[in-house]
Image: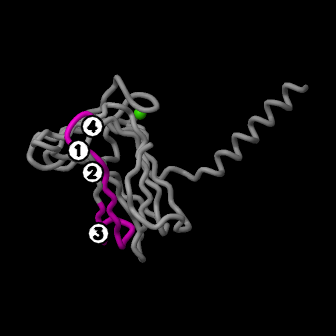
Amino acid sequence: MDRVISWCSIAIAACMACSAHAANLVPNPEFDQGIADWTPTDGSIVAIDDIQGFPVKPSLHLQNISTCCASVVSACIVTDAVAIDFSFWRKAMNGRSGSSVYTYADTTCQTETSASHIVAIAGDEIWTPIDRRVALPNGTRAVKVGLVTNIGSFGIPGDAYFDHVDVQALADLVFVGDFESSP
Ligand SMILES: [Ca+2]
């Protein structure tokens, strides 16, 4: 009986943990369904890597060979949040890599109202957590998030892996700003 009670307690604790963490708004965040729900931009070299990922394979492998950039952009995410917490894991191999956030005044992502891009020098080749908190303009009805590689120093093309994407709606603006950080 003690064991039954113990397992019940664990289940209740797990449920409480779930409720404290709201739903992830991004479809296919682990790339388990390949590139579904993500749209590559022109010139992007996109592959699903079945060997590595964080916390588990597969992951998205993104490269650019042109002088510009490569990216994949998420499906349209409808939200009336005042800010979002956008996080993902990145293994940066070469060039520069980072992320984008686009905001829209409608629920079908037709009228773009802002775009925010952050890319950083890459190349540490270690799975690293990235976390951005982005304030949304007044009247925002939807967002898209993007994962990006770009030309780095001395013209070296971008090359990075991405996985475990998460977008949380924030009801309160607990942080004003738009930054990229890693421990
Ligand atoms: Ca994965």
Indicate whether residue 95 is drawn in magenta. yes
Give the distance between the C-alpha atoms of the residues marked 4 and 1, in whole angstroms.
8 Å
Dot 1: within a 10 Å radius of its alpha carbon, few (fewer than 14), some, or many (20 or more) residues? many
x then y, percent, for residue 166: 45, 48
Q: Where is 100 relative to 136, above or below?
A: above
Identify which residue is drawn at 35% across, 58% down: 144
What residue is shown with label 1? 96
Mark 4 sits near ligand 1, with its Cβ under 8 Å away: no
What residue is shown with label 2? 119
What residue is shown with label 4? 160
Which badge, 3 or 2, is on the more N-terminal residue? 3
Disc 2 residue type?
Val
What residue is shown with label 3? 112
Q: Dot 3: what SS? A: strand
Q: Where is 1 relative to 69, above or below?
A: above
Identify which residue is drawn at 33% across, 65% down: 109
Which badge, 3 or 1, is on the more N-terminal residue? 1
Q: Quadrant of residue 59?
A: top left
Label 3 or label 2, whichever lies nearer to me, is 2
Give the distance between the C-alpha atoms of the residues marked 2 and 4, in whole angstroms.
12 Å
x then y, percent, for residue 119: 27, 51
Magenta region, residue range: 93-116
Label 4 or label 1, whichever lies nearer to me, is 1
- Is residue 94 in sight in this rendering? yes
Give the distance between the C-alpha atoms of the residues marked 3 and 1, in whole angstroms.
25 Å
Disc 4 residue type?
Ala
Disc 1 residue type?
Arg
> Can you say which quadrant of the picture contains the N terminus?
top right
Identify which residue is drawn at 34% across, 25% down: 50
Give the distance between the C-alpha atoms of the residues marked 2 and 1, in whole angstroms.
6 Å
